[in-house]
Image (tube, coloured by chain):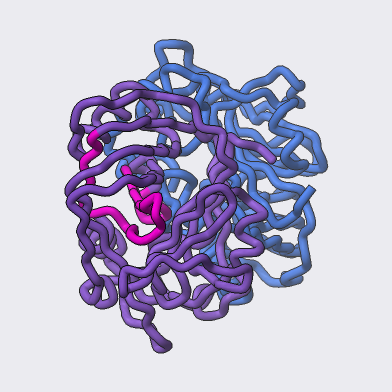
Chain colours: A purple, B blue
C-alpha cells in the first residue's frame, strides 16, 4: 500500500446541501489506510482513525470505538508513514503551529498530514449530532453542534492540509481532529494550544478522490444553486 | 488495472502562471492507462492517446507519434472500457452532443469519458506552440495558438467531463481532443459537428490526482495571486 496517497471518500461539497447518507463502510474505508478523519451518516459525530482503529466523538462528547458496518458520507484516510518535523517545548497557539508547519515544510501546493502528540492547553472541540433523513443542510446541522473544552489535556491531533485549489472537494488549508490519550475527549478542533510535544508530517503526491456514484441522491443533485464555498467557510473554518 | 479510475498528472491551474516543465514521462503516464489527453512540456502541442499510442498534434498541424521520453506537465489517462451510449444518424452540433451525453448519462456529479467515432463536419481545432523557459502564462501562450479546420473529416473525438467542483484542478465540464483516422489532422477541439457515428461513454468513481511534488518551481509557487478560474475560462473554453 502506497504511503504517498491520500484517499478521500465523498467531498465536503456534498455535505453542504445535506447529502449525508453513509456511502462507504468503515470496513471498506480502512482498506485504504490506517489513519484518518471523517464523519458518520447524517453527520454522526467526528471521526478520528489512529493505528487502524476508528473512534467517534459523539454529540455528548463520548468517545466510541466504531465497528466495520458504521458508514460515512465523507472521510479521508492514508497509511501512516510520518517523519519528525519538530519537537516543541514552548507553547504554540493553533495559528503558530500552522505557521511553523507551513514554513518548515513549504508544502502548500500539495496534500499532507500532520500528527501532533503531546500536552495541549485550552482545547475546544465540537461534535455534530446525527440528523435523520431528510437531512438538513451543513449550515443548519453545524449550528446544532455541541462544544467541549479542556484546559489541559494529553492527546493526539491529526490534521490534513489541502491546497486552496481543492477547497470544496476537501477543506482548503488545515483541518484538525483531536483525541485524548485517555479516550475521553476529542472532536473537530476549534482551538488547541500545544504546550510540549512532537509534530510529525507526511507528504502526499496523490489525492485519490472517490465519489459515491452508486448513490442516486448524490448523482441527481443539482449543485449549481448551492453556495458551496460560503457554506464551507461558515461550517468548517 | 481498474477501469473506474481517471488518473490525472498535474492540474490545469499550474499551467495558468506558466509552470510548464514536463514532470512526467509518457512511459510513466501510460502505466496508468491506454487512453487520454494532455499537452507536452512548454505546452508542446495537443496530445491524444488511443489504444496505448500517444499522438501529438503540433503547432504546424502535423500529427506525430511520441515516444516514452516525451514529458508532460498536465495529462489525463484511463484504461478504456467504454459502453455504447448512442448511434447518431443525423447531425449533432457540439452543444447538441454534450446535451445528449448529459441527458442520457445523468453523470454531472462525477468524472467520465466520451469516445465519439464517425464522420464529422466543420471541425475546428487548435494546437499551441512549444514555449521555452522562462515559460509564459497560459493566457499569453494560448494567444499564440494555431487554428486548423476541416469541412469533412472521419475521426475520433476523446472527451473528458469533470464536475464544476473540480474546475481548476481539471477542466470543469467537457474537454475534447480530436484525431482523424488518417492521422493528418487533430488537436484541441474548438468546434465539431458529428454527422454520423457512435458515442461511447465510461464512468469513473475515482479521480487519482497526482501532483508534481518533486518539481521545486511548482512546490514554491504562490498561487494566491493567479486568477485561476478567469484564466482557464479564457484559455480552455
Position of residue B173 measured from the top left corner of the image (x, y, whole percent): 48, 57
Position of residue A221 measured from the top left corner of the image (x, y, whole percent): 45, 76
Q: Nearer the viewer, residue A135 or B8?
A: A135
- Looking at the rendered image, the quarter that the C terminus of chain A falls into is bottom left
* Relative to A154, B13 lies left or right: right
- In the rendered image, residue A175 lying in the magenta stretch gets the answer yes
Position of residue A67 measured from the top left corner of the image (x, y, whole percent): 59, 69
Residue located at (67% from left, 23% from top):
B25
Residue B125 in view (yes/no): no
- Looking at the rendered image, the quarter that the N terminus of chain A falls into is top right
* Relative to B59, B77 lies left or right: right
Q: Which residues are magenta?
A: A167-195
Residue located at (63% from left, 68% from top):
A68
Q: Report which quarter residue A141 is drawn in.
A: bottom left
Position of residue A140 measured from the top left corner of the image (x, y, whole percent): 25, 77
Relative vertical location of residue B124 with respect to residue B15 in this rendering, above or below: below
Q: Report which quarter residue A31 is drawn in.
A: bottom right
Residue located at (79% from left, 47% from top):
B1
Relative vertical location of residue B103 with respect to residue A87 in this rendering, above or below: below
Residue located at (75% from left, 56% from top):
B117
- In the rendered image, residue B208 lying in the magenta stretch gets the answer no
Amino acid at each position: 500500500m502506497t504511503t504517498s496517497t491520500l484517499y478521500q471518500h465523498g467531498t465536503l461539497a456534498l455535505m453542504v446541501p445535506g447529502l449525508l447518507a453513509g456511502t462507504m463502510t468503515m470496513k471498506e474505508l480502512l482498506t485504504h489506510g490506517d489513519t484518518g478523519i471523517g464523519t458518520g451518516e447524517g453527520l454522526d459525530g467526528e471521526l478520528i482513525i489512529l493505528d487502524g482503529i476508528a473512534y467517534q466523538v459523539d454529540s455528548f462528547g463520548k468517545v466510541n470505538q466504531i465497528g466495520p458496518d458504521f458508514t460515512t458520507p465523507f472521510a479521508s484516510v492514508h497509511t501512516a508513514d510520518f517523519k519528525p518535523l519538530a519537537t516543541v517545548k514552548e507553547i504554540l497557539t493553533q495559528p503558530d503551529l500552522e505557521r511553523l508547519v507551513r514554513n518548515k515544510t513549504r508544502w502548500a501546493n500539495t496534500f499532507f498530514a500532520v500528527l501532533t502528540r503531546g500536552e495541549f492547553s485550552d482545547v475546544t472541540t465540537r461534535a455534530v449530532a446525527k440528523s435523520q433523513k431528510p437531512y438538513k443542510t451543513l449550515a443548519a446541522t453545524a449550528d446544532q453542534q455541541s462544544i467541549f473544552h479542556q484546559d489541559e489535556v494529553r492527546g493526539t491531533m491529526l490534521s490534513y492540509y489541502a491546497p486552496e485549489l481543492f477547497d470544496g472537494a476537501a477543506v482548503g488549508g488545515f483541518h484538525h481532529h483531536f483525541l485524548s490519550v485517555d479516550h475521553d475527549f476529542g472532536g473537530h478542533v476549534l482551538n488547541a494550544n500545544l504546550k510540549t510535544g512532537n509534530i510529525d508530517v507526511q507528504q502526499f503526491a496523490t489525492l485519490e478522490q472517490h465519489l459515491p456514484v452508486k448513490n442516486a441522491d448524490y448523482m441527481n443533485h443539482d449543485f449549481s444553486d448551492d453556495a458551496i464555498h460560503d457554506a464551507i467557510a461558515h461550517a468548517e473554518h
